[in-house]
Image: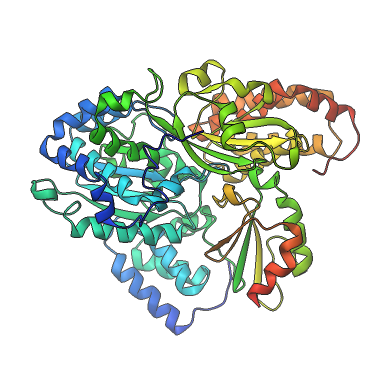
Amino acid sequence: MGSTALTAQQETRLRELVTECKDVPGALLQVLEKAQEACGYLPLEALALIADGLAIPLARVAGAAGFYPFFSGEKCGRYVIRMCRSAPCHVNGAAATLRALEDALRIKVGETTPDGRFTLQAYDCLGLCDRAPAVMVNDTVFGPVFSGDVKEFLTGFE
Amino acid sequence: MEETRLILKHVGKGDPLSFKEYAAAGGYEGLRKAVAAPEAVIEAVSASGLRGRGGAGFPVGLKWKTVRDAAADRRYVVCNAEESEPGTIKDRVILSGDPHAVIEGMAICGAAVGADRGFLCLRAGCRQARDTIEKALSEARTNGCLGKGILGSRFDFDIGIRAGAGAYACGEETGLIESLEGNRAEPRLKPPYPAFAGLWGRPTVINNVETLANIPVILRIGVDAYRKVGTEQCPGTKLFTLCGNISNPGVYEFPMGVRLRRLFEDVGGGCPNGKRLKGIQVGGGASGAFVTADLLDLPLDMESCAAAEIPLGTGSLMFFDEDADVIALCRLCMAFFADESCAKCTPCRYGNKRIADILGSLLSGKGREEDLEQLGKLSDYVSRNSLCRLGQVAPTPVLSALRNFRDEFVKACASQKTVTA
């Protein structure tokens, strides 16, 4: 978990969220999703505020946040690159594309570039088996992206 | 070879969001019939022989009847669109290409079982699909097909979208319920089945996207016409996801019982670059069975597949050519299950990880002959003892590969060379 305090604006947004959802049964995951949208990730301070606001134990909130891969406890780059590593992409050269991405960005999977621009993640199936090897950057999907395409591909996110 | 498009009829044609276009092609006719005579719906669905398309193949009419007959103050309809196994994308194609079909299917189900609330549970990262469906839902409301007093009747029904957060365990029906209730998606012990005690303890129908998209078709064309497609035991069509080393990857719709060879040669166009087909992973995706190219004449319907001990699953067909390493593919599948295990039960939590580790040591040339026996035993143990279906099917790729590609495993033990493919 990060330790950066929330900005005043983020804190206001989170308080709005928990007030809206306080009486909605099962709203925790939706609150977490919107909180991540507001903060970019889910720092411990955000989880504590949500736990307090929804009157749910912090352990349960953190347990749910930690369970789902979509939620991140770490600050990510402006562009989150998710590279599919599942079998349909693998047989179409996904491992080579991933290596080319690591080389071009000079980081390993799971890391963020020092300038805070890119985070590189390996992902289990992006649901784009018809475009293998597939890559997702934030909410936009790309494919096929072969190792030879990587340099040019990255220039799109300067 | 021509497709038989019952489910994909509107996909790729016109504006998928347009209520007008969908209604002009006979859309929401089934819902009109359902609100006029809700008791006839379950009869029709049972007579159609429709079985769940999410992998388990449970008779849909029986599931609905159980929910309708269960005593309760409230019932729910849940559409499982948490399709997140590698190698299957059919539900995404239906939902983004023809969302009204799924909405109509859910509303018909609501009328039939006496539910007034439905939830459509999308997989994570489907933001585009979510906007599409949100628009389709509001069109349906404006035109009286959702909301209070549907199509002038006394039946109320509405649908809310819930976006998942990327956990494979949500694909299991009780895991999905846990996530709808705001918890970790850890599957529950069954019984009680969701049909008796599901979401917030109420009787709940949970159906896959493709299953629900079949419902309006059955009511529109009638049971007799529907049963003319597919096989006697397994009527209707099936959506197949063709992926891997195949020239024309994508989602295609064919009658149940279509031969695998037709899909590989005529539809898929064979392996690219003139490569030879080595094998196919058939089933749900990562949980599918690895079979050799000798099996190309297998008819793809639930009965024929079950007889050959191959799961038809969600209809995922991952083709791989002569360059692919079966052990490396197995390891990828098992790494997926090790990562995605919800960790509630021990066989799945540790077993799948250990299986992946053994496969990793085979790949790095450190394999020993006794590893193969251990691999078989452990896989068998995990599939027999895991709490939920996801854990039970996880070792299928390894068990099938050990049967059908045994030579490669033996060779890997003998060789000291690292395989990088």
What's the coloring here? rainbow
* Depth order, front residue of A101/A43: A101
**Residue B304, how many percent across, how many down?**
50, 18
**Residue B225 location, quadrant:** top left
**Is residue B74 in sight in this rendering?**
no
Would residue A18 be found to the left or right of residue B109 on screen?
right
List x then y, in percent, for residue B191.
36, 28
Residue B14: name its quadrant.
bottom left
Q: Is residue B417 above or below residue A120?
A: above
Give me the residue at 73% from left, 49% from top: A93
Q: Position of residue A59 (x, y in %)?
A: 47, 57
The residue shown at (43%, 83%) is A9
Q: Residue at x 57, y 42 (%)?
A: B87
Relative vertical location of residue B59 with respect to residue B150 in this rendering, above or below: above
Identify which residue, B119 or A71, lies in the foreground. B119
Tell whether A137 sits left or right of A152.
left
- Decide: is B316 above or below B145: above
